[in-house]
Image (cartoon, rainbow, N blue to C red):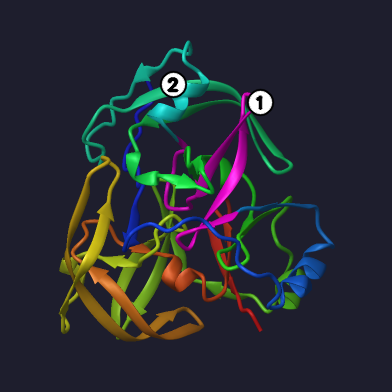
Amino acid sequence: MRRWTSILLLLAIFGLLPMCSTRPGGDGNDAVREALGSVGITTVTGEDYHGLIVVPVKIDGKECHMVVDTGANATVLRRDSFRRNWSKRKTVPVNPGEGSNIRRDVDMAFVRSLAVGGLSVYGMNLLVMDMPQLGNCRGKPVDGLLGMNVMGMFPLLVDLQENTLTFLLGVPADDLLERLHATPLPVSVRNGHMQALMSLDGTAVRLVIDTGATQTCLPSRDWKGEVKERKGDVVWLDVNGKTRFASTSIVEVASVRWGGLELSGIQIMLGSDLGVVGADILSRGRILLDLRSRQAWWIPRN
């Protein structure tokens, strides 16, 4: 049996979870679509889900709704959604292997097809696990996480403000990147995760690029500067389905440098064992990822 090692499925959500909404369009997105029109693409428009994107996905012909999660190296279905749609389908227990952050029962199920937009994948395994924290979006359950084992098959452009996921059917050419005013970003790949090589007020960090996390998180061991405590209704959700309400430690970062990109005024959650750059940073622009060539670019909004 294949071992799933180091599966990162993290959502850090602040406050009580509101209903989904659709953000207004515009903000230069037409220019981006025009530039992308020179290459074969398929674009999926989803719903805003607490700053994340939920898109329709068809699994064996049945529609599900899944979070676009570049921080997950596997695609995952909620156990209750799986039972509702495939009550007679067999699952196989997964042995996560040493070093995995999964600490409870997780199963694996084979599906014949998965389709998102114009992209279809045939014959693949999905993980099945309890994820009660995902809740509902517009009255429908959020059925799971769309991971990089599917999305990483093609270069993809994620726009967390426009709620769009765009697949490019080929490696972005230099002239296309120039038209998009794309800035190359230093990244590395480990265990199927694309990691941002960033500097926070001069401190070098390596953070998973995670469109499935609302908040950028930094392990305590990676920060030596000043820390502030923030009281409030922080909701922390992890891969094991555990939810805890607590105050949290916050790092106020004056300067975030990611290659040629510089951002300011960032608050980062401190204390997680997992380091991720989340939607609070990624939504400031558009992120273009190519897992196969291990490249990433930042596309500005103006």
Above or below, comparing residue 60 to residue 260 in the picture = above
Give the tally of numbered discs: 2
At horizontal 78% and vertical 64% (from top left) the residue drawn is 36
Q: Residue at x 30, y 61 (%)?
A: 275
The image shows residue 155 at horizontal and vertical percentages of: 64, 54
Is residue 193 visible in the rendered image? The answer is yes
The kind of secondary structure element at disc 1 is loop
Quarter of the image that includes the N terminus: top left
Q: Which residues are magenta?
A: 47-76
Label ID, residue 72:
none
Question: Circle 2 sits on which residue?
Answer: 83
Left or right placement of residue 154 versus residue 238 in this view = right
Q: Establish if 229 lies above or below 147.
A: below
Depth check, mark 2 against mark 1: the one in front is 2
For the C terminus, the image quarter is bottom right
Magenta span includes 74: yes
Secondary element at tag 2:
helix
Q: Are marks 2 and 1 in contact (CB under 8 Å)?
A: no
Pinpoint residue 161: horizontal percent, then vertical percent. 58, 68
Residue 104 falls in image quadrant:
top left
Q: Amino acid at mark 2?
A: Arg
Would residue 147 appear left or right of 61 to someone viewing this image? left
102 or 28: which is nearer to us?
28
Give coordinates of residue 151: x percent, y percent: 58, 46
Q: Is residue 31 magenta?
A: no
State left or right for residue 138 relative to residue 276. Answer: right
